[in-house]
Amino acid sequence: MALSQTPATSPLHRKIALRLMPFLMLLYMVAFLDRVNISFAALTMNRDLGISDSFYGVAAGIFFIGYCLCEVPANLMLARIGARRWLASLVFTWGLVTVSTAFVHARADYLVMRCLLGVVEAGFFPGVIYYLTLWLPRSIRARTMALFLLALPVCNSIGSPISAHILLLDHLANFRGWQWLFLLEGAPAVLLGVLAWFLLADSPRVVRWLSSEEKETLLRELDAGEGSEQPAARHLVTRPLVARVALDALIYFTLNSAFYGLNFWLPKMLVAEGVSATASGWWAVIPYGLSSFAMLLLSRLMGRSWLGRLILVSAVGFAVAGFAHNLSLSLAGFSLAAIGAYAALPLFWSASTGHMSARVAGPAIATVNSIGVLGGFVGPSAMGWLLDRTHSYAAGLCSLAGLLVVGAVIASVRRQSHAPAALSAQ
């Protein structure tokens, strides 16, 4: 079912979305920027700290080890202490960790800070997805999710040239360019964490910007969505749900392997094509800008059945980039890879959360995400390991293309096995 076929958004839903989504998207943009800005820091930091390509790949990916270990407990903490306190604390703390990374002096310290950043960020993404189940009915959640995920390519489109130009501050006040990068891009999270404490609310019941009638209407909609499910769908541990979660985790693993393989290595691959460090930030806008447009457009025009096909599009893009021998063809491949991967994300989460009730969404989403994000360790690490041994990016890019083909096959199997359940959930 195409996302454009979902029920029309009511004035109440639009009011809630306009109140929540801009700030949540801003938080996600800052989170993602602090997660991937090492891709530009590496252009000079690797030399200063004596970091090899293999070690850089591990350092980029170790973020997801801490992320995976702490994601489910973090999401349970959100339900226990409330969204406002928990999400605000996470944002503030990861900002401090990012700022602190500017002062690492050894490779071991760098690994610790990257892992710690993953621990702190672990609860944010699944927490926001869970948070939205408390505010919006399932009928429009997929459309809202697509809007939220748009923060990723927009963040890269804006953040890439900014990060590249921050490196020009090298030696200002006796700090290296990569140190300024962590300082200037970590500080906004600290400030936003303070703002989140005052701007976020734990549930619709406690906000002042909804009238009593609006609250009653919304709570009836949310309760009706829960009550429309079959009794078996209300519980977490059921065989069909476990099978779906397992397939979703595998698909997400392949997507993340390629997604973060591209995000963490794109600046270095552009520099290898002869682009300067500063110019690499602007060249990176091309694939990320196109993927922003594709995510916004395709998420509205295409339904869940297109998930496997978009993953294949990304696989073709990685293969093209792997065999390219000039900047133009490389950029075409990177753009195709980014378009397929980014546009697949909202369709993936629409399919994944379509069969979940709000009461099981938190643990189930966290499980899918915590297993799937391990691809964020495998993809960048494999790229670095293969680069050190082959002295070429081709092997790594083609490996990521192969993983995506596997993901597309699993997506097809999942759709054939669970299409009736998924469609009925809408």
Image (tube, helix red, strand yellow):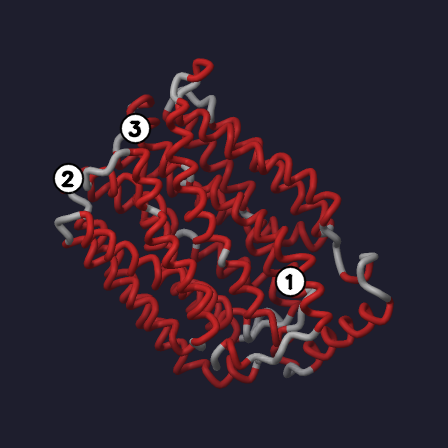
Q: How crowded is mark 1: few (under 14 residues within 10 Å), some or many (20 or more)?
A: many
Residue, disc 2: 391
User: Is 25 above or below relative to 418?
Assistant: above
Q: Give the mark toward the camera: 1 or 3.
A: 1
- Is residue 140 or residue 112 the one in the foreground? 140
Residue, disc 3: 51
Q: Which mark is first along the chain, 3 or 1?
A: 3
Q: Residue at x 19, y 46 (%)?
A: 393
Q: Does the rendering let one see residue 120?
A: yes
Q: Distance between the residues labelled 3 and 2?
A: 16 Å
Per the rendering, the mark at residue 203 is none
Residue 201 in the figure: left or right of residue 371: right
Q: Does the rendering let one see residue 257?
A: no
Q: Which mark is first along the chain, 2 or 3?
A: 3
Residue, disc 1: 132
Q: Which mark is first along the chain, 1 or 2?
A: 1
Amino acid type, label 2? His
Q: How far apart are marks 1 and 3 (CA)?
A: 40 Å
Q: Residue at x 49, y 54 (%)?
A: 370
Q: Which residue is drawn at 64% across and 35% down?
A: 191
Amino acid type, label 3? Ile
Disc 3 on helix, strand or loop? Answer: loop
The x, y position of residue 155, in whole percent, is: 47, 48
The x, y position of residue 98, in whole percent, is: 51, 33
